[in-house]
Image (cartoon, rainbow, N blue to C red):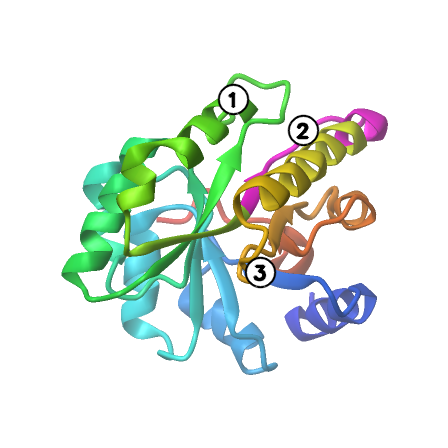
């Protein structure tokens, strides 16, 4: 398996309007460096501890995204350096990010994670909950977070039409939120949807950012310690 070949192949397929986040979870730093040495700088992790450990040993020009469920008590560990938190699934979490961003004299970009899948194991806000966050007094008072878009994870299924409809609903919400709350905000431009198994459908349905791991790095070494 050639990470360089996989990465170049995927990048050659992506429209110029779509950004690739290479999901490096469970892969060792030296594996990540193979993608880095090929010019890639945008990586995603789903666990805070693993993210911090890689940040400490890998080049500092890497932009790190947190894509997994984030516990409020762990925000402080990534607040000094994180480029984007894709998985904001509650107002309480957004408040904690704002607080820690202020402590670090930063503005942290975030995506609201929307629950679109027909699976109990997925996290995310309902459409109604997302609107409640955006209309809340607490959000209006936040100065150190910037919501730049939405993220969603489709159902893990072979039913591509179901996946397509889930992505389409998320794109519809994205447009509605943009028009109502961020009309004059050019920074609200990120719709993160699509992973290794469904990113092509996601792009068809309007994704501006895709999260691809196994198609770049191969299968994850789950048994590695």
Total marks placed = 3
Task: Kindly identify which residue carries mark 3.
Answer: 21
Residue 106 is situated, as x and y percent measured from the top left of the image, at 26, 65
Seen in the image, is 153 located left or right of residue 1? left
Task: Kindly identify which residue carries mark 1.
Answer: 128
Task: Kindly identify which residue carries mark 2.
Answer: 156
Q: In the image shown, does 152 or 32 lie closer to the viewer?
A: 152
Q: Write down the quadrant of residue 158 in the picture.
A: top right
Q: In the image shown, does 93 or 176 lie closer to the viewer?
A: 176
Question: In the rendering, which numbered label is found on residue 18?
Answer: none
Please report the bounds of the magenta region as a residue range. Answer: 150-163
Seen in the image, is 108 located left or right of residue 23? left
Seen in the image, is 89 located left or right of residue 52? right
Is any atom of residue 54 visible in this view?
Answer: yes
Q: Are marks 2 and 1 in contact (CB under 8 Å)?
A: no
> Is residue 212 in the magenta section?
no
Label 2 Cα crowd, 10 Å radius (few <14 / some 14-19 / many 20+): some
Which residue extends farthest left?
Answer: 103
Circle 3 sits in a helix, a strand or a loop, which is it? strand
Residue 213 is situated, as x and y percent measured from the top left of the image, at 60, 54
Mark closer to the chain start, 2 or 1: 1
Label 1 Cα crowd, 10 Å radius (few <14 / some 14-19 / many 20+): few
Q: In the image shown, does 211 or 164 lie closer to the viewer?
A: 164
Mark closer to the chain start, 1 or 3: 3
């Amino acid at each position: 398996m050639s990470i360089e070949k996989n990465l170049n192949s995927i990048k050659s397929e992506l429209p110029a309007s779509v950004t690739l986040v290479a999901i490096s979870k469970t892969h060792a730093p030296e594996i990540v460096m193979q993608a880095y040495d090929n010019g890639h700088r945008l990586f995603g992790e789903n666990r805070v501890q693993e993210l911090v450990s890689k940040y400490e040993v890998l080049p500092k020009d890497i932009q790190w995204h947190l894509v997994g469920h984030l516990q409020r008590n762990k925000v402080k560990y990534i607040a000094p350096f994180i480029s984007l938190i894709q998985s904001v699934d509650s107002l309480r979490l957004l408040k904690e990010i704002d607080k820690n961003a202020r402590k670090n004299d930063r503005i942290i970009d975030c995506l609201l994670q929307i629950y679109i899948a027909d699976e109990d194991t997925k996290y995310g806000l309902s459409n109604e909950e997302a609107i409640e966050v955006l209309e809340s007094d607490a959000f209006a008072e936040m100065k150190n977070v910037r919501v730049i878009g939405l993220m969603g994870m489709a159902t893990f299924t072979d039913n591509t039409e179901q996946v397509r409809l889930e992505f389409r609903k998320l794109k519809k919400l994205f447009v509605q939120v943009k028009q109502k709350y961020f009309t004059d905000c050019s920074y609200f431009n990120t719709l993160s949807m699509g992973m290794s198994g469904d990113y092509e459908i996601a792009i068809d349905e309007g994704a501006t950012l895709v999260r691809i791991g196994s198609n770049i790095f191969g299968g994850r070494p789950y048994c590695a310690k």
